[in-house]
Amino acid sequence: MQEFFTDSVQKLREFKDLLASPKKIVITTHQNPDADALGSSLGLAAYLTKKNHAVTVITPTDYPEFLQWMSGEEQVINFESEKQETAKRLIAEAEMIFCLDFSALNRIKGMEEYIRNASARKVLVDHHQQPENFADFVFWNEKAAATCELIFLLIEILGDKALIDVPAAECLYAGLVTDTGSFRFDSTTKDVHRVAGELIAIGVVTNSIHRKIFDNNPLERMQFLGFVLSQKLTYLPEYRISYMAISKEELARFGSKNGDTEGIVNYGLSIKGVTMTAMFVERDDMVRISFRSVKDFSVSDFARKHFNGGGHKNAAGGRSYVGLAKTVEAFLNLLPEYQAELLSGE
Ligand code: 5GP
Ligand code: MN
């Protein structure tokens, strides 16, 4: 299924008419924003600001330090901060609300009821499976590699590509890089490379962005990664799965901060022969789970069915409330049921 409001002449005109005069606009994205979430939000914010709108980006939670180089980041309001009342007022007063990089309102934590109840016209721009029906304008394609790709296309469709400046292009490029696993996942189509090429033409220095995202680690994070890979990663060839489970105590031992586990799950997919990998991280109130897979095995279906989650076919997340050990046990107990599927493929 693809939903492009831009395919309907009337809807596109309605959207353009709305943006034709200055509007109060809020942009939001999913909790624990990643580079695609924050990059798409800030890239769009920069564009809409150039079009004379009053734009605020509000995130449901904080985001990791390695994203704080993004232009406009210093003006983002974290809903879980002392600025919550301001955020609530901006949401209530907004004339348009853009919801980026999430498909269901339960992904925006404490902001859910305020966004749901807001009188603003809502615009969903996203690439996750099974979008909830809450927006007036839906620019959604699960085949898109990143929401940043969709934001670029939307601005292009509006005829405003020339308004994307270098800082905004850097934000959009960052989302393309991370959501495609540095242009290596199946989602890396020629369209992705075209958009990347357009962003480079605008002035993105690719190596500089890659280094800001990936080569910007405190020593402790590298040591944490070493610990996880050497002590925590398990491979079960009989199922072609790998997994790692990280306790709160281990996170604390390495001074791990929010976002430090980001990306580590992908190492589990590097093992020869692996079909699916899972990373379990013990948090205060739950166990956060990240799933990754290759080829046809849908971790999105798996996460939705068993772990209160969802996402994309090859990258999904979920959560569990029964503690770390029991969660891993439940996961291992599910494997026989999926064995044939996990072993199929080359
Ligand atoms: P991550 O493992 O990096 O947190 O998430 C992988 C992908 O799945 C991301 O695109 C993320 O937005 C999505 N995702 C994570 N958790 C959930 C969830 O609970 N529901 C849905 N629909 N998507 C999720
Ligand atoms: Mn995304």
Image (tube, helix red, strand yellow):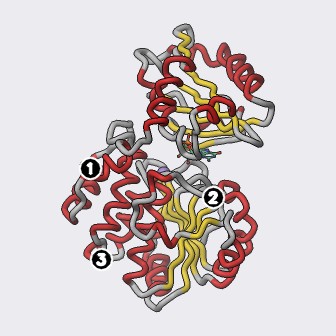
Counting residues from the start of the chain, the first of labels 1 and 3 encountered is 3
Three-letter code, disc 3 = Leu
Q: Earlier in the sequence, mark 2 or mark 1?
A: 2
Kind of residue at disc 1 = His
One can see residue 166 in this view: yes
**Which residue bears the numbered disc 1?**
193
Does the numbered disc 3 mark a residue whose Cβ is under 8 Å from ligand 2? no
Which residue is identified by label 3? 163
Q: 114 left or right of 311?
A: right
Judge whether 154 appears above or below 159 on screen.
Answer: above
Circle 2 is placed at which residue position?
A: 61
Above or below — where is 202 with respect to 141?
below
Q: Earlier in the sequence, mark 3 or mark 2?
A: 2
Mark 3–mark 2 CB contact (< 8 Å)? no
The residue drawn where x is 55% and y is 55% is 63
> 148 and 205: which one is in front?
205
Residue type indicated by callout 2? Thr
Q: Circle 1 sits in a helix, a strand or a loop, which is it?
A: helix
